[in-house]
Amino acid sequence: MAAALSFPFYFLLFLCSVLLPSHEAAFLPELPNLATISFEEGYTQLFGDSNLMLHGDGRTVHLSLDQRTGAGFASQDLYLHGFFSASIKLPSDYAAGVVVAFYMSNGDVFEKTHDELDFEFLGNIRGREWRVQTNVYGNGSTAIGREERYDLWFDPTEDYHQYSILWSHERIIFYIDGIPIREAVRTRGGQFPSKPMNLYATIWDGSIWATSGGRYKVNYKYAPYIAEFADLVLHGCSVDPTDDAPVCQGNDARVYDSIRMSPDQQATMSKYRAKHMTYSYCHDRVRYSTPPAECTLGHETKSFLPSGEAKFNYRRHRGKRYGHSSSLNSADL
């Protein structure tokens, strides 16, 4: 991976992961040479022609959706394990039906046995907040959707916020602003993502499903919808796609595999999930009469409806619920 070291960004992440876990609940992993890169150093445009625009010497990417097309980009290399991150600012105002995605996939290489790790941002009607959805597929296990949805403690349209994926041989951790929100451990055998993937970012029209099951569509009167991406990080094992048995070797593999969440980090993640998770596939008894094998259900089941929706989500005020600060302390969870 070609990378130009961004010292302020690395130093910030180092401080967050080492000095501030108890105060700021920032738990990004410690990784050497964690650098941001420009678009040309690591990515290529997928679609959207002029709907992809570069700013700030190519270190900020704007993807726009209008009635003509959306836009997207992908990493130039495939990676087998690593840490992948971007700071993202979402479109404001009426955004029903709009989907912004930041994800890893190898669907164009392994059509029937593909792996995927998703951050999906689902737009909403005016006065209701964006939702964040994560998903995990392994070895073509698309018959089982492993979606989880969450609300946020900030307005993701007002400023950039960091969304990160750590993927090692043993575990996957999703982070928002350095706070772990989901961990998937290798317990599903062949259904754990295990093949090299590209990193993608897209914006597109998801009117048929993204907002209230398709009830609210994209209204192009408010177009263009612009999603902004900055602080791009590709810290992974770059592999040759023609290699029949690629592996992540050496120091990188040992670093990724050594990362574990501390008890404090686990506790913070549990608090976040209890307060902000609005849907869990593990609790969706309509889709799955028998929960998927990796689901361990406990006393929290009583907090979910048979549809998998969190009960507290139905009691909330219908307007915006963002707090006054974009920072989050452990006590806030």
Image (cartoon, rainbow, N blue to C red):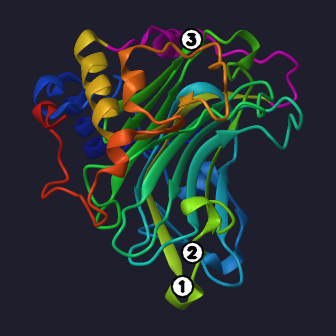
Contact (Cβ within 8 Å) of mark 2 with mark 3: no
User: Where is 183 relative to 34, above or below?
Assistant: above
In the image shown, does 129 or 44 lie closer to the viewer?
129
Nearer to us of marks 1 and 2 is 1
Which label's residue is closer to the chain start, 3 or 1? 3
Report the magenta residues as a range: 241-261
Looking at the image, tell me whether mark 1 or mark 2 is earlier in sequence order.
2
Q: Position of residue 277 (x, y in %)?
A: 39, 38
Q: Residues within 10 Å of mark 2 (few under 14, many from 20)?
A: many
Measured Cα–Cα span from mark 1 to mark 2: 8 Å
Q: Label 2 amino acid?
A: Ser
Answer few, some or many: residues within 10 Å of disc 1's Cα (few below 14, many 20 plus, some between 14 and 19): some
Q: Residue furthest bottom?
A: 221
Q: Is 324 within the magenta?
A: no
Say left or right for 259 vs 251: left
Q: Is residue 245 left or right of residue 174?
A: right
Q: Amino acid at mark 3?
A: Glu
Q: Can you say which quadrant of the picture contains the N terminus?
A: top right
Front-lying residue, 246 or 128: 128
The quadrant the C terminus occupies is top left
Q: Which label sits on residue 170? A: 3
As shown in the figure, which amino acid type bears the numbered disc 1? Ala
Of pointers 2 and 3, the one earlier in the residue sequence:
2
Provide the residue designation for mark 2: 64
* The quarter of the displayed image where residue 53 is located: bottom right
- Residue at the (51%, 58%) spot, across then down: 122
Q: Which residue is mark 1?
A: 223
Cα distance in 3D space between marks 3 and 1:
42 Å
Asked if residue 252 is among those painted magenta in the image, a careful observer would answer yes
